[in-house]
Structures are given as structure tokens and as C-alpha cells.
Amino acid sequence: MATLLSVNVGMPKDVPWQGRAVHTGAWKSPVQGPRMVRQLNVDGDGQGDLAGHGGEIRAVLVYQAQSYQYWQKQLGRDDLTFGIFGENFTVDGLPDDEVCVGDRYRIGEAEFEVTQPRVTCYRVGMRLGEPTMASLLVAHHRPGFYLRVLTEGRVAAGDEISLTRKGPEQLSVAEIDALLYLPGRDPAKLRKALNIPALSPGWQQSFRELAAAQQPPQEPGWPGERASNQQPRQEPGWPGFKPMRVARIVPETPTVSSIYLAATDGAPLPEARPGQYLSIRLTVGEAAPTVRSYSLSSAPTADTYRFSVQHEPHGKVSSYIHAVLRPGDLVDVASARGTFVLEKSTRPIVLISAGIGVTPVLAMLHQLASTRDPRPVWWIHTAHDRAHHAFADESHALLARIPHSHEHIYYTSQTPRSDEPHITHGRPTAPSLAAINIPSNADAYLCGPTAFMDDLSCILRDHGLGIEQIHTEQFSALPAINPGVTATATVRPHQPPGPQGTGPLITFTRSGITTPWSPAHPSLLDLAEACDIPTRWSCRTGVCHTCITHLVAGDISYTTPPLEPPEAGTILVCCSKPTTEVVLDL
């Protein structure tokens, strides 16, 4: 019979790490005597990052003495004391390849239910001084698991652990862990996992997405989720950058111009999906080449791509495009990419934009008009005034070709004429959007300033649209995901401190930073952090795929091979280094 060997607790504290402070409860130590186990944790215990640990579903973490013995041999360590893996219960027995999600156990006065494997997290590596530990736990099928507290009560070291009920589907903790993090997934096991009521909602959602990703694709495109065991899907286009010729430049407003690009050899251009963008590389002055990304602003033809640029008074690249670029010039262009695309659906469509944010949704409007899409379409755009309303006539004409279209324009600094009933003075508000009867089952696509998209997304959610129905696009850096790291003042991205590297150039397109690589940085993620570029990561060892990033151009190698390769055209920046010049969508 399994036995509880140790009860371990620890309250969250700030731990120094790589020049930052991490708020974590991973430092746990054994306690003597009985401890009360409550719905959220053991008395005297706490978690520093409730997004990934703790809460009702993850109240108690369990790890096995047999795994301690295994790691002592694997790591050559003799200092692994109970609690060092961050667990609350160290047990004799209950191996990960036998315990099933949904199993129920009685320990002392309390009863528990197994809900999920341990979350892959860099903090276990911090605690052990083994940076790759998160990856090792998954690769060696020894993650440990979480318990939900069904009946509160006291437990103590020495208590026997008795199985009170087997969970449905009989999928072990190790099998569930491998389903999420390792390649070669069995579709039948994915379906079985979704039939386990005890499985935590977060893991259920991940498995639903993985099951959907295993379905044959309806059309080419960049998948938004983890790779499945299907062959990687390729985006039509070309690798890296290639020269294209500026065919013509068309002023749209006093501050916006459209640039039409054509292939230098006259060959037909690969088809792009409505909403995707081009990355343009320009040499402005004597500085290193600069990369900027611009949405395609119309449906591409076989001969040309169109993108549109707003002239920013202090924008180096936009000033160059407006003042220097001429028809006939050559520019380096990466093929169209991006996940903010018009998806196939039968639901109503809402296209919302502000200012130059109109460009990707205008491309979507071109697509809807070209097929005379029968779905209801709401076109909602905010501009400063009539003179600065880019594509006003074009969008109006496109909407006329859609059988069930609704046009609503807002001018923030001009009163509309009496013959313009579709134009309102002001900005979109909750009452004004409610008045135009947007259905709650619509798919909404938003592009504009971040505050604009945040405000409108909140209004749409209050109106009844689910989070999965609201799609947003932004070209600035994405919000950071740095679990547990104590927040500091936001710093504008900059060149890394210290001596300049001598390696290949690394360009972060969303942040506008180009800098030479230096081996002083363990990975591309570390270089991005040295530049104060917002980054997204969790395990830092190539397991969780939180750091997945589109590779616009270049080649990399992995310092720690990921347990599952990412989709073609993407890399895991947490464990990769450049082998050539690299351009990242970061």
C-alpha cells in the first residue's frame, strides 16, 4: 500500500534569478505532525503564481520517493531532500505510469482526486539548480501530479494512502502528460482524455485544440496552436527575403500611401490570406537594414501585392517610404504570413478598425465582396475626419457588393453631413454598438491602437461575444508572459548592454530592434530579454511552446532539442541560437 512519507509546505517569497526577482512558493520543506488540508492548499503553504499553480484544481502537488531515487542516479546528486521538487506530498508508491487522472484517494482524514500532471515550469529547475529540469521531467515520464481536495481533513507523514475509486478511461498521469507535450499523439487517447470529468479545464481546452489541429486543414494557413502529429503545413510563399519591384505608389490621404509590389521576373505571386502581412527590409541611411511589417490592404492579384503606410512624423522607415521610395525601386520582402486572417465560417462578420488599422480588415472586405458573401457584414471604422479617412470610397463600394452589409463610420473631429446617415461624430461606445444590433454569434476582427482594441473587445464581450469570437491584430510587441517574475517598470526596447556582438544580425520586427548576435547570450530569448523586448515563456527548455515565434528569415540551431518540434516556419526562442542572420516576429 502507498504511504505518505512527508508533508512539505512553503510560503511564496521573492527569489533572485538572472538579475530579476521571481515570486515563487517552490521552496518547500517537511513539517512535523498533522497538517490540515483545505480546499485550496495545505495549512502553511502557498503558491506564488496562481495562473499555473494552486487553486482548487491544483491544491496539492504529489511526487514519489521512487522518482527521487531515479533522479539521484540520473543527475548524480545526493542532496535531493523531500520538497525540493516543489511537492506538498512526498509518497512511497503512486507512480505516474499507474495513477490515472480521475482516481480518488484517501489520506488520513482527507479525500483527494487526481486532476492533471505537474505544469512544466522553469521554477523546478531554479529550485534544483538544473535549468533543463522541466524538460527532463516530461522526457523521462516522471512529472508528478496535482490533487483536488474533495474532503478537507488532517494528514501526516506515515498515513496510508488508499484508493477509493478508479477514474474513467484509465489514462495514467504519464500518458496524459505525453499527450500534451510529446509528438506522436494517439487520436483515440485524445478523445478518451476529453471524457475525464476530473481533468482540469485548462488541459481539456488544450486537448480540444490538439484534436481540432489533427483534422485535415480546410485551406492553407498558419495554425494558431501547438503542432499535432500531422505533417507540418507549409505557408505558400518563399523562404526569407527576396527582392520585389515597386510597381506604383498611390496617395490615399495626406498621410497614407499605398505601395504596389510586383515580382522582378513577372511571375505570378503566391496567394495570401485576407489579413496577413508582409515584412519589408529597407536600408535607411548608413544604419543596419531595418525591417517593418505592413498588412496587405487588398486582396492580392496575380501580379501585385498592395500594402499601405501611414507617415509618422518621427518614423524613420515611414518617412523614407513617403519621401524617398519611388516606382522601379527594389525592396526586400518576406512572403505573406500572420494568423490574423478571415476564417471560414457561416457566422456573421464584424470588421472594426481605427486609423491605419483599417488595412488588414480592408483585405478581408475585398475577399467578402469578391464572393458576394451572403453573411451579414458590419463595417465599423473610426477616423479623425473626412480628409484622413483612408479608403473611404473603396470600402463603401465594396460594401455595396455584399448583399447584407452595414456601414458605420465615426469621425472624432468632424460633424457628418446630413446626406451621410452612416457617419457619426464621436467614437464607438457600448450604447452605439448595441443600437446597430451586432448579433452575439458574430465573429469580430479588430485592428487599431491597443487601447482602442481593448475597449472595443470589452464592449463586444459585454454584448455577448465569446473570447474565441474576437480576433485582434497588433504590430507592436505582444504582451509578455513571464510567470512569477516580479513586475518592473516598462522599458522601451533598446540595444543590449555591454560590448556589441560580432555574429549575424538579429532583427525583432515587432520591436524595431536589429543587433548583432553575441555568444554571451545563451539563447535568442535571452538576447530579447537583454533588449527589454516583451517575451513569452514558461518552461525555458523547449517543452511548453509558450515561446513559439514566427521565423521570418534565417536559420537556427537548438541548444536543447525540443521534445516536440514546432510548426514549420516557427521556432522556440527559449532554446535556440542563430546560425545565419535571423529575423523574428517578436
Image (cartoon, rainbow, N blue to C red):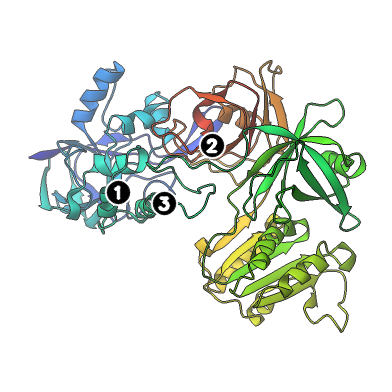
Residue drawn at (71%, 18%), measured in percent from left and top?
500
According to the picture, the residue beneath numbered tag 1 turns out to be 187
Mark 1: few, some, or many residues within 10 Å (few <14, many ≥20)? some
Q: What element carries label 3?
A: loop
Residue drawn at (56%, 74%), measured in percent from left and top?
463
Residue 526 horizontal/vertical position (percent):
57, 28
Mark 3: few, some, or many residues within 10 Å (few <14, many ≥20)? few
Q: In which quarter of the image is the C terminus?
A: top right
According to the picture, the residue beneath numbered tag 2 turns out to be 570
State left or right for residue 519 relative to residue 511: left
Mark 1 vs mark 3: which is more N-terminal? 1
* Cα distance in 3D space between marks 1 and 3: 13 Å
Disc 1 and disc 2 in contact, CB within 8 angstroms: no
Q: 59 or 370: which is nearer to us?
A: 370
Residue 137 horizontal/vertical position (percent):
32, 31
Residue 256 horizontal/vertical position (percent):
85, 54
* Cα distance in 3D space between marks 3 and 2: 20 Å
Instruction: Answer yes or no: is residue 494 visible.
Output: no
